[in-house]
Image (tube, grey):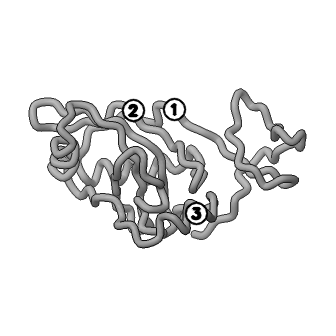
Amino acid sequence: MTRLYPYVGSRNILERTQGHPPGAPIRSAADLTRYVAAAGQDELTVTYTVDGEGLLRVADRHSEHVACAGNTPVRAAGEMTIELLAEVSEVLFITNQSTGYCPEPACWDSVAKALDAAAVEHPQAFTTAFEFRRCERCSAINIVKDGWLYCPCGAQLTSHWNFGSTT
């Protein structure tokens, strides 16, 4: 079963984004191309989520993932950079960087399925993948770098993803 990631970020952000419309649904390459073209740019970085049904949604890069997802659990979340070339869009860079959902790198499969279903060209894996851990002492969200499993508070972090989940 595919993991659904619940929102684990700031309560203040969650409250601030209540009532915001979800991100634009991307069901086809044409949907993504229209979204990028509407921004008036040849290259655009966006916030994205993949919802529980496998639908890709995109929103302005400065928006919160929880707003993009319509305040629902997600299969994946992060940022992607899209290039518009002669009326066709292609994903150049893509990450799982979302401190609101803290998805594991393994969520790539859900991202790839959503992009493939929309017939959007994309890399074969995250161009940068992040590992997240919650500190069991102070509850801080940490990005694990170079295998460093310590929180700034001094506590050792778990070796496995520890934010809770639904399936």
Please name which of the two marks, 3 or 1, marks the residue nearer to the observer: 3
Secondary element under disc 3, as helix, strand or loop, is loop
Q: Quadrant of the N terminus?
A: bottom right
Residue 68 at what x, y percent from top left? 40, 59
Q: Residues within 10 Å of mark 2 (few under 14, many from 20)?
A: some
Residue plotted at (19% across, 34% down): 84
Image position of 158 with respect to 54: above or below:
above
Q: Is residue 154 left or right of residue 63?
A: right
Question: In the rendered structure, are the residues bearing label 1 and label 2 in contact, judged by CB atoms less than 8 Å apart?
Answer: yes
Residue 113 at what x, y percent from top left? 36, 52
Residue 93, disc = 2
Residue beneath label 3, please? Answer: 7
Seen from the viewer's position, the closer of residues 109 and 33 is 33
Residue 82 at what x, y percent from top left? 29, 36
Determine the CA span between mark 3 and mark 1.
21 Å
Specify the amino acid type for callout 3: Tyr
Seen from the viewer's position, the closer of residues 46 and 88 is 46
Q: Residues within 10 Å of mark 3 (few under 14, many from 20)?
A: many
Residue plotted at (84% across, 53% down): 138
Q: Dividing the picture into quarters, in which one does residue 100 lie?
A: bottom right
Secondary element under disc 1, as helix, strand or loop, is loop
Q: Is residue 62 left or right of residue 145?
A: left
Seen from the viewer's position, the closer of residues 86 and 116 is 86
Q: Is residue 102 left or right of residue 119?
A: right
Ranked by sequence position, the earlier of labels 3 and 1 is 3
Ranked by sequence position, the earlier of labels 1 and 2 is 2
Q: Residues within 10 Å of mark 1 (few under 14, many from 20)?
A: few
Q: Is residue 102 left or right of residue 156?
A: left
> How many numbered marks are there?
3
Specify the amino acid type for callout 2: Phe
Residue beneath label 1, please? Answer: 128
